[in-house]
Image (cartoon, coloured by chain):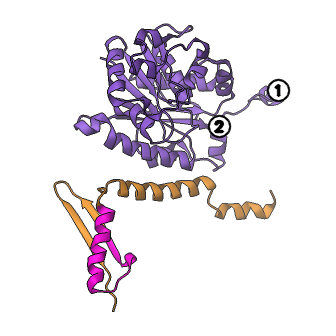
Chain colours: A purple, B orange
Amino acid sequence: MAKIIVVTSGKGGVGKTTSSAAIATGLALSGFKTVVIDFDVGLRNLDLIMGCERRVVYDFVNVIKQEATLNQALIKDKRTSDLYILPASQTRDKDALTQEGVEAVLNELAETFDYIICDSPAGIEKGAQMALYFADAAIVVTNPEVSSVRDSDRILGILQSKSRRAERGEAPVEEHLLLTRYNPERVQAGEMLSVADVEEILAIPLLGVIPESEAVLKASNQGTPVILDQASEAGQAYQDAVQRLLGGQLEHRFLEVQKKGFFQRLLGAK
Amino acid sequence: MSFFDYFRSKKQPTSASVAKERLQIIVAHERGKRAQPDYLPQMQQEIIEVIKKYVAIDQDQVNIQLDNNENCSVLELNVTLPD
């Protein structure tokens, strides 16, 4: 039985797609057959982050409308085995995703996959609600910044009332906090909310903290999920987050200001 | 930073702590509203209309609140009547 995980946030630009790509890749690297679905109809971007934009032939909406089969639309990742991408449609039709259609696709995927990652669009409109409706677990991507934290709390409210699990009165959707773009220097200077502050306000378990890192932009420039950049702090932090998602108990890293050595200072290392 | 700035900066709360305080207030407020049923604002409006027929009151003199306990909900209506 597949586990459906939605990557959501309410606010845009906090790192949902980056996180979806990284976590899906991490799960596949751990040996689980994983598919990552772009729910952002009209603003497809997961394909770019995954580096498969030129291999898109059919998309999610084509499958829902039965213009293509699921196997025709799924893109097999070239770097990671057991990883597949289902791209969003670029149609401007907002109602292209129907609940029945999404359910049928998810049911078919659940027969062969271990994990289904749903990359939610920003906002709390239909697209975002569709992405979270069938979820068993939610990864709430949050930046340590007021509007992002507030929007995350909104989306948590929607998970608790509008998801299928909530409507059916089943066990609630598992909630995980993923704090991204974290800058320990600014936290120390009192200019940024700390991990503890955000945890206290949102009151959900912490899955991981991804430090602000130049590696993230570099990875998206190249169309490589940042988790594959194992030398970068962001890549390592995503690896830790994936292990925690799989039940591992790992201590959180990169929360403190790194002391620079003499040579690092001299060479201006970051 | 001058010698005097050192003392001054101690009194100012950091911008992060201001952010945290503001968030705690707004999030608590919004969570409270979320728990309310959708019909509450309209019901409040209609209750006010009824009271207005008999007493001259303003909108902000009526406070309506729904508290959920374990197995019962309490609708609390607070009306400040003018002298």
Residue lying farthest to the left in this orientation: B71
Q: Is residue A234 left or right of residue B64?
A: right
Residue A126's spot in the image, x, y percent?
Answer: 42, 38
| Quarter that holds the N terminus of chain A | top left
Query: Quick check: can you spot residue A74?
Result: no
Query: Quick check: can you spot residue A265?
Result: yes
Q: Is residue A78 left or right of residue A114?
A: right
Q: Residue at x 62, y 45 (%)?
A: A187
Residue stretch rendered in magenta on the structure: B40-64
Which quadrant of the structure image shows residue A5? top left
Which quadrant of the structure image shows residue A32? top left
Q: Nearer the viewer, residue B53 or A230?
A: B53
Dot 2 corresponds to which residue? A257
Q: Can you tell which mark lies on residue A267?
A: 1
Q: Main secondary structure of the magenta part?
A: helix
Q: Nearer the viewer, residue A109 or A151?
A: A109
Circle count: 2
Q: Residue at x 38, y 76 (%)?
A: B59
Q: Is residue B4 above or below residue B54?
A: above
